[in-house]
Amino acid sequence: SVPIDCLTRKIDLSVSPLVLEFGSVVMGERKGMRFKVNSNGALPAEFSLLGPDGERIPEAMGNSPPLDSTGHTSLAVTKLPSAVAGYSVVYIDVVFAPMHVGAFNRRMILHCTEATVPDIELEMKGEGENVPIYVEREVIDLQCCLLGKLYRDVVVVCNRG
């Protein structure tokens, strides 16, 4: 007698990591990370990314991430596959580009088109920081100046980075 183990073909998705921690990113700069979508089942799965209100998240075109609800560029999905084959892996690339100072927290849902597969909640966290450049003296006083004369002073620009 030979033992035979039979399983039904199914869709079994997992995502790692569930939380992307971008850390502190200086305004005007970008930091990219990725989610790994793993298919542990034999059937292929089609999926999409949804926002917290159920709206579909578009893929960013080129180097310009889409604007968020406040009109600031914060987060862009730059590589968004729409399906994963059975027993394979795909990656979702996400870019964080803060345009204002402060904490950033956004949730997304990985929604499979098959109704029996539960949604997977993803979270992105980061913080926008000020540009690390400042001047040593904010005010330069040249006293009285005459028209047609040349006056000079030194402005020292420092970098905190």
Image: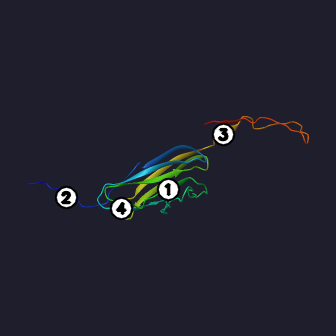
Q: Which residue is mark 1?
A: 77
The reply to whether callout 4 and callout 2 are in contact (CB within 8 Å) is no
Q: Mark 1 or mark 4, which is nearer the start of the sequence? A: 4
Q: Mark 2 or mark 3, which is nearer the start of the sequence? A: 2
Q: Mark 2 or mark 1, which is nearer the start of the sequence? A: 2
- Residue 161 lies in quadrant: top right
User: Mark 1 and mark 3: span between their CA atoms?
Assistant: 29 Å
- Residue 11 lies in quadrant: bottom left
- Rendering coords of residue 149 (x, y %): 89, 39
User: Mark 3 and mark 2: span between their CA atoms?
Assistant: 64 Å
Residue in the picture at 55% in, 48% down: 30
Q: Which mark is residue 133?
A: 3
Q: Mark 3 or mark 4, which is nearer the start of the sequence? A: 4
The reply to whether callout 4 and callout 1 are in contact (CB within 8 Å) is no
Mark 3: few, some, or many residues within 10 Å (few <14, many ≥20)?
A: few
The reply to whether callout 3 and callout 2 are in contact (CB within 8 Å) is no
Residue 8 lies, with reference to residue 97, above or below; the image says: below
User: Mark 1 and mark 2: span between their CA atoms?
Assistant: 39 Å
Instruction: Left or right? Give the position of 117 relative to 106.
Output: left
- Tell me the quarter of the image containing the N terminus: bottom left
Furthest residue to the left? Answer: 1
Q: Which mark is residue 6?
A: 2
Given the image, on which type of amino acid does mark 4 rest? Answer: Ala
Mark 1: few, some, or many residues within 10 Å (few <14, many ≥20)?
A: many
Q: Which residue is mark 4?
A: 45
Given the image, on which type of amino acid does mark 3 rest? Answer: Ile
